[in-house]
Image: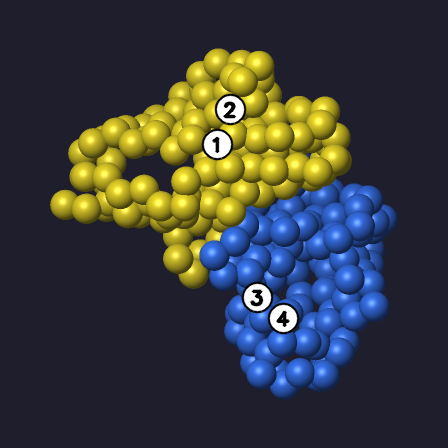
Chain colours: A yellow, B blue
Amino acid sequence: GQSLEQPSEVTAVEGAIVQINCTYQTSGFYGLSWYQQHDGGAPTFLSYNGLDGLEETGRFSSFLSRSDSYGYLLLQELQMKDSASYFCAVRDQEAGANNLFFGTGTRLTVIP
Amino acid sequence: EAGVAQSPRYKIIEKRQSVAFWCNPISGHATLYWYQQILGQGPKLLIQFQNNGVVDDSQLPKDRFSAERLKGVDSTLKIQPAKLEDSAVYLCASSSRLAGSYEQYFGPGTRLTVT
């Protein structure tokens, strides 16, 4: 079966950098997506890595190492509004190439 | 462009009652997903439609849950009869053929409480 591991909670200071790690075990891995969800809100797409390396989108970057079954989301210049839950999700053979299997999420709290 | 619309936003029912949720995806998005998100967990896929056909319903509890997407546009998800453990947020999402499933657009969800 599939498994995704990410820290349940992370706290960081406004203006700082934080890294949220995600390790996975799947069969037939296709790629890793990241989503942000504020309390009471809808998940919103942040980034996708289908190949090894770093993808940068503004203050957010995502990294993937297929050989290590590992990825991370990097948030720079943290703002209070970044306080939210962050989910990694895999596309893999078991989920189906057209589906996503979500992790349990990391709750990020940004403090002044 | 308008986002994914869902209604109602909140619903409270008693166990053994039935309930239905409605979703209208982003215009032109062929793929529609229904997820269940229990508090403190990630979204769990219930069913995926491609146009008006079911692609994956392996995680749908078919003894009580049903879904349809007539005419390949909006969709309804029904629970009958509801159980206490069905209390969750039900999220609808859509994606375009071009972007692929890794970039899904989610609606605001329906928060269901079963008492």
Label 2: which secondary element: strand
Of the numbered discs 2 and 1, the one sitting upstream in the chain is 1
Is the C-beta separation of discs 1 and 3 under 8 Å? no
Residue that carries the numbered disc 3 in the rendered image: B88
Q: Quadrant of the C terminus of chain B?
A: bottom right
Q: Amino acid at mark 4?
A: Glu
Residue B12 position in % (x across, y down):
56, 81
When asked about the image quadrant of residue B101, the answer is: top right
Dot 1 alpha-carbon crowd within 10 angstroms: few under 14, some 14 to 19, many 20 or more: many
Label 3: which secondary element: strand
How many labels sit on residues?
4
In the displayed image of the protein, which residue is found farthest to the left?
A112
Q: Chain of mark 1?
A: A
Residue that carries the numbered disc 4 in the rendered image: B85
Residue B109 position in % (x across, y down):
55, 61
**In the shown orientation, is residue B63 left or right of residue B115?**
right
Q: Are marks 1 and 4 on the same chain?
A: no
Is the C-beta separation of discs 2 and 3 under 8 Å? no
Between the C-alphas of marks 2 and 4, the distance is 33 Å
Query: Would residue B8 be seen by someone viewing this image from the given angle?
Result: no
Q: Nearer the viewer, mark 2 or mark 3?
A: 2
Q: Are marks 2 and 1 on the same chain?
A: yes
Between the C-alphas of marks 2 and 1, the distance is 6 Å
Residue that carries the numbered disc 2 in the rendered image: A70
Residue that carries the numbered disc 1 in the rendered image: A22
Residue in the image at 71% along x and 84% along y = B17
Compared to A72, does A109 lie above or below? below
When asked about the image quadrant of residue B75, the answer is: bottom right
Identify the disc placed on residue B25.
none
Q: Amino acid at mark 2?
A: Tyr
Q: Amino acid at mark 3?
A: Ala
Query: Would residue A102 be seen by someone viewing this image from the given angle?
Result: yes
